[in-house]
Image (tube, grey):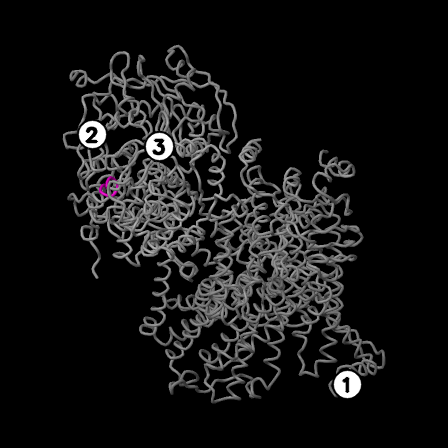
Amino acid sequence: MLYRETGQFKTTYLADMAIFPIRQDYFLMIGILLFAYVIAPLVMNDFWLNSIMIPTMIFALAAIGLNILTGYTGQLSLGHGGFMGVGAYACYKLTSYFPDVNIIIHIFLSGFFAAAVGFVFGLPSLRIKGFYLAVATLASQFFLEWAFGRIAWLYNYNDSGAIEVSSRTLFDIPIAGASAEPVTRYFVVLAIVTFLTWIALNLVRGRFGRCWMAVRDMDIAAELIGIKLLPTKLLAFSVSSYYAGVAGALMVFMWLGAAEVESFDINHSFLILFMVIIGGLGSILGSFLGAIFIWNLPVLLRAIPDMIGVNIGAATVEHMTFMVTGALIIFFLIVEPHGFARLWQITKEKLRLWPFPY
Amino acid sequence: MEILHGIFIDPFITMYELPDLLVQVLWEGFVAGTLYSLIALGFVLIFKASGVFNFAQGIIVVFGALSLVGLHSLGIPAFVALFLCIGIMFALAWLVEFTVLRRLVNQDPIILFMATIGLNYFLIGFGEGVFGGEPKTMITAELGLPTGAFDFDILGGLVSLQQIDITAAVTAGVMVGGLAVFFNKTRIGRGLRAVADDHQAAQSVGISLNHIWIVVWFAAGIVALATGVMWGARSDVSFALSIVALKALPVLILGGFTSISGAIVGGLIIGISEKMAEFYWGPLVGGSIESWFPYFLALLFLWFRPQGLFGEKIIERV
Amino acid sequence: MSEPTAASSLPDIVTYNTFPKLLRHNAERLRGRPASREKNYGIWQSCTWDEVYEEVWNYAAGLMDLGLARGDKVAIVGDNRPRLYWTMVAAQAAGAVPVPVYQDSVAEEMHFVLEHAEIRFAVAEDQEQVDKLISIKDRLPSLETIIFDETRGLRDYTHDFLHSYDSVIERGRAFNGREPGRIDAEVEKGGKDDTSVMVYTSGTTGQPKGVVLSFENIIRTSRNACEREGLLPTDEAMAYLPMAWIGDHIFSMGQCYVAGFCVSCPESSETVLTDLRELGPSYFFAPPRIFENILTTVMIRMEDAGRLKRKMFSYFMDHAKRVGVDILDGRPVSAGDKLLYGLGELFVYGPLKNVLGLSRVRIGYTAGEAIGPDIFQFYRSIGVNLKQLYGSTEAAVFVTIQPNSEIFADTVGTPAPEVEIDIAESGEVLFRSPGVFVEYFKNPEATKETKTADGWVHTGDAGFIDERGHLKIIDRAKDVGRLNDGSLFAPKYIENKLKFFPNIKEAVAFGHDQDYCAAFVNIDLEAVGSWAERNGIAYASYQELAAHPQVYEMIQGAVDQVNQDLSSEERVAGSQIKRFLLLPKMLDADDGELTRTSKVRRGFIAEKYEPLITALYDESAKAGKIESEITFEDGRKGRLDATVDIREAKIISISPQAAAAE
Amino acid sequence: MNDTVSNNDQMAAGAPAVDPTAGGRIGDVILRVNEISLSFGGVKAINDVSFDIKKGEVRSIIGPNGAGKSSMLNCINGFYQPQVGHIWYDGVDYTPMRPHLAAENGIARTFQNIALFKGMSTLDNIMTGRILKQKASLLEQALYIGRGKSEELEHRAFVEDIIDFLEIQAIRRTPVGRLPYGLQKRVELGRALAAEPTLLLLDEPMAGMNLEEKEDMSRYIIDVNEQYGTTIALIEHDMGVVMDLSDRVVVLDHGSKLADGTPDEVSANQNVIDAYLGVAHE
């Protein structure tokens, strides 16, 4: 209905293969960016930025990572919480060793450590598929959890066993640590997430994306047309963990300010997996939708009793959150197993064909 | 050099020098393995009959145990509570079938898998909401389960076998035997196998998938309840157990997702090797390696036999 | 720079009086603007006017290098492709005459045209057409050279008379290098009275005739129409109708070169509708059949929509029916209605036009046949400025056009600029205009028959000018007959009324020299099929569906309704349909029952289905038997052997007023 | 019946002056399969089979079900490794052949049970056929610069040519999972063609097609062979098609070679008539 595509014809392949070939989508995107970059920082208070916007962005980034692996390449992973941890600890160690280098560079670099770890734990994918592989990724999850807790070098032999962020600046403005304003941190996160999202979009629409999808859809056929399976899968593991690693670093340095083993436990792996599944496998957009939904659902549920003036104990709210999240996940899987992205796709298709049903 | 010594020589010297300790470790591993086997058994039952990778199996174990303790704390006699719990397991099976499975029939395995993670969350929230989140003690005595230990003065030391552990092992044996009889001798059991082999064929000969699903989930629920009781008796009853319960997954990898005997053998291998590793090699790297050792073992194993212990080699076709 | 307006942008056609001259002029005044587009390899490959100019000049030189001489005839065979349009101009530049040929004609039909036109050069689109040409070349002594556009499949053809388009351009480049200015000189030799194009009318009877049209005919007529409609270089048109049809020649060549707008060619015939949607032309022509098909699809697709959506759709469509046309024509409408229409535009009309690819249409034409008033009003009511025009090959299309804001579904409008219209004693429509053709090629008798010495042309259509000054066409003059009781019988008029029902695809009425009027009806498989599906009626074939009693019931309703209509019009009230039957097969051009332009060949059908007609006029017969040869959809031939029910329709006795008027 | 008539018409008119052999269409041996045996467990799928394929020819492999035809193709492009025997391709002994080696050296194939990437569109599926020709680095691709961008556009243009050739413009954007069978087969052929193969292995390209679709597919196969000089190895059950298209035919039965030669020779071979045609008519 709102899509009026008549006359939007393409005279070059460049235009035809653009990320947003439909003008309305393009404008929608501009609107969303405008909201994220201009309106949100203007109208939102610290609570909103800190509890909603920043974590949503960070988890969306992690979800993009997992989506590249699971949604695009078809390799199920239950270890992305651990990969986030690798990024976080790597960043922490980097800042300890090179305190003068800018934190943003560290954040980008720390992703590579996660990528390396992802690469190693991706090796079994050569021989193992499906749920067997998922269990294999649990090995990385539990091993990494163990490492974060037991290898004291990782947390600089702190008594607390936790990693803590000290103040960091960019152009003399504090962007990490206790003195950083939420809005500053928000901008840093937003910029990094925007950039990496754009990269992800480029990757999945090009040759590598097609290799990944080919492996996902039919690995034998992919092999027979000359795609080497192991490098393709390992690349997916690496890129995927890179995203998780950067997300982990952002999580500690731009959001929590401190972290310990529990920040990267298996529940986080599940959380990200939920985001990907509910958002939509094989969709970058879905990663955002999933992150928005899964992260903010508990926030919303916690806020509801307050809003309607009912006083419920914190523990009860916590239990309710678990129940409702679980139930809603099942509900959405039943309604649309392919996630919000598919829902949006269907809606968009309907809008494009409106008033016709097909 | 020292490290190599620590890995390849010292542990074996210890084993040789302190055989009683070795026996004790093996026993501990055997019992842990039995419990892993039981959880894995629940997985296998469900996977075999419905192709669902039931991630919530570990939670169901805890949920069963919690219900039992919770009901008893309300003043219900232990055995009545036990029967009520069996009822709860049936209700759970029915609910899962009615609200989840039949609505997701023919979906990708990963979707069903996610649904069971959703179920996982739901049960955690529900269980903690109803029974409270703090750890509880299993009503071992009230159920008439033996406590105490048999101590043996052998091998130049003391080997102590907890009676509850022996009970657990026996229970596991009984469960497996019972299931074997159930599958081979009863009509519904045979139907179940038919479903496992071929959904469409089963449907075409008039076996109702929905009923079968309720039955297997119920069967898996009972196995879970038994596991929960045994396990609860050895440690506290809390949802933290569910993470430990995930160790059933490497067991499955070893034994194969569809093999009952595989689950048993795999469980024992995992249990014993993990305890051995922890006891003899763990200290080298700071301990607690049993949290990940089974997964690595499974991985290593998969590398050489991707089809599992009892699976058949797959010839790929195009 | 301000946007060009129509008046300022139209070139001086006295100076630029041929297409090559216009092209050279456009290359200058419209430098950088797109001249043609072609959906090929997934995108709209575009060419600017200056690029086209350069290409055509090389092309013309290449043709001359191959021996093309002034006065030669060049056949053009293929689907709409920019290169084939360029062929026309290139041929004209070299002083030759382009002769577009229907691309779907079989080798035999093509042979006649090529032989009659004394073709020396033929330009074919692809292997299919080349094969066709080669197969008849032996019998065409004049045909010397064949040029093809698509090389696919032709790589191994070794005939020395075959040349690829690219090789011709190559030759042209060399030629222009050798003799620069030669083409310009050739172009200067051309003048307004030279033959611009020769098009062959498909002709319902007899052999096709080659209509010779001069540059003056085409360019002046095009300019007049452009001026009247205010066409601009920014307009977009799509060329998808046969190039051999004069309409396409005027719209996609004449007006395109005069107004300077861009003409785009679809990717293939299957993708026309998708391409239409992508392109969104602002100037659009389609015969009534296409508008009808689109509307039928719209209705069928809406049937499958949800209840709420259907309700909304019908609510807004009703509203549009009420006020849409008034709003389009700028007549005053209440503010509330306007607001509601605006809502409708948002929810229904806008999206609908968009999905159909009509949202940018400024001027839409339909012609060739009568369009159903409901169909016509549908498009107008949703804001598509659809207009009817009346024209003929002999007039270089434009005879009458419906002027904006004076549009009536039952007339074809007022005379186009510089056109005079007269109605002969017999009721036949005559016209005279600058577009009147020069002659029929090598056929002076026919020329004389059609064109009077002082330039009046017999259209062969019967019609009259109504009180508003609009021309109204009833039927082909020769088809208008009399029943035995003397009442006027206009078969086309009746058939059209029947065809306006969405369930009826085609109808053939009989009655001349008979006691009463009777009709064959072809049901519309798509519409009736969908209806059958919704009502749980099972059918295995068209034949079975057409024989179904409930379908008969439904069509009976339509026939009764037509009779009701007819009874209220005094001229035709006497020729109501008394008996009808549903034909067990679709009338098909492949079986010779329709012309290539999908017009009913009444005489042929009467002969072929003679037993059925006999049964129709034997009032005791309840059914007729027919055996005939048919062509299946996949092209196989087969025999049809069927018994066809005959039904009686309700005859409305002529109303007292009508009777009194007589 | 109809098409024979039109063929005759063309002949009569002396039309397309194409002579397949005169133009030197067929060249030297490009692939030689030497004494190959393949077994799964105890089951022998191929038993000591040798034959060769010459550059530019259409070579058919026929035989009843289970004769080892698909297994033979699988050996040729390295999906299966025969236990015994050698595969020479383009003068090089590729024992063992590996799938990626086959693909890199210009062997492409289609599959008996369509092996398309169901989640991707027609365009993307055919684009995957170009993957080996794309060299852009991860960085270029990630930033959509340099080859990351130019290659995409180049290969898109190449793929569009194939789409045009196979006349599948209308389904360019359709996910292949939604396409009818015949079109899927066509897309699969497109994917194989996108690799610009020297040797094209077609595993029952016309299975399950109606007459019209078969005619289309035959035309594409001929065109590919004639226009691009692609060597074609074809498995097909429709004898009419095989006899029409092939230059030479090898007949397998129960994993062994039964006959080898021109269509005429093979169809006259008594062994073939007994073993193969007899079976087919049962």
Q: Say whether residue A301 is magenta.
A: no
The residue labelled by disc 2 is C456
Q: What separation in Å lies between label 3 and label 1 (alpha carbons)?
A: 92 Å
Say which of B278 and C234 sits in front.
Answer: C234
- Foreground label between 3 and 1: 3
Residue reaching furthest to the top: C620
Residue B37 location (% of width, % of height): 71, 64
Q: Secondary structure at mark 3?
A: loop
Q: Say whether residue C217 is magenta.
A: yes
Pointer 3 local density, CA inside 10 Å: few below 14, some 14–19, many at least 20: many
Is residue C498 shown above or below A187?
above
Please state if C509 lies on the left or on the right of C660 as rendered: right
The residue labelled by disc 3 is C502
Mark 1 belongs to which subunit? B
Quadrant of the image occupied by residue B48: bottom right
Pointer 1 local density, CA inside 10 Å: few below 14, some 14–19, many at least 20: few
The disc labelled 2 sits on which kind of residue? Answer: Trp
Q: Secondary structure at mark 2?
A: loop
Say which of B88 and A245 sits in front.
Answer: A245
Mark 2 belongs to which subunit? C
Same chain check for tags 3 and 1: no
- Label 3 vs 2, first from the N-terminus: 2
The disc labelled 1 sits on which kind of residue? Answer: His
- Foreground label between 1 and 2: 2
Say which of C243 and D120 sits in front.
Answer: C243
Q: Secondary structure at mark 1?
A: helix
Residue B139 location (% of width, % of height): 65, 68
Pointer 2 local density, CA inside 10 Å: few below 14, some 14–19, many at least 20: some
The residue labelled by disc 1 is B5
Look at the magenta stretch and give its main secondary structure. Answer: helix
Q: Residue at x 76, y 74 (%)?
A: B149
* Magenta-tinted stretch: C216-221
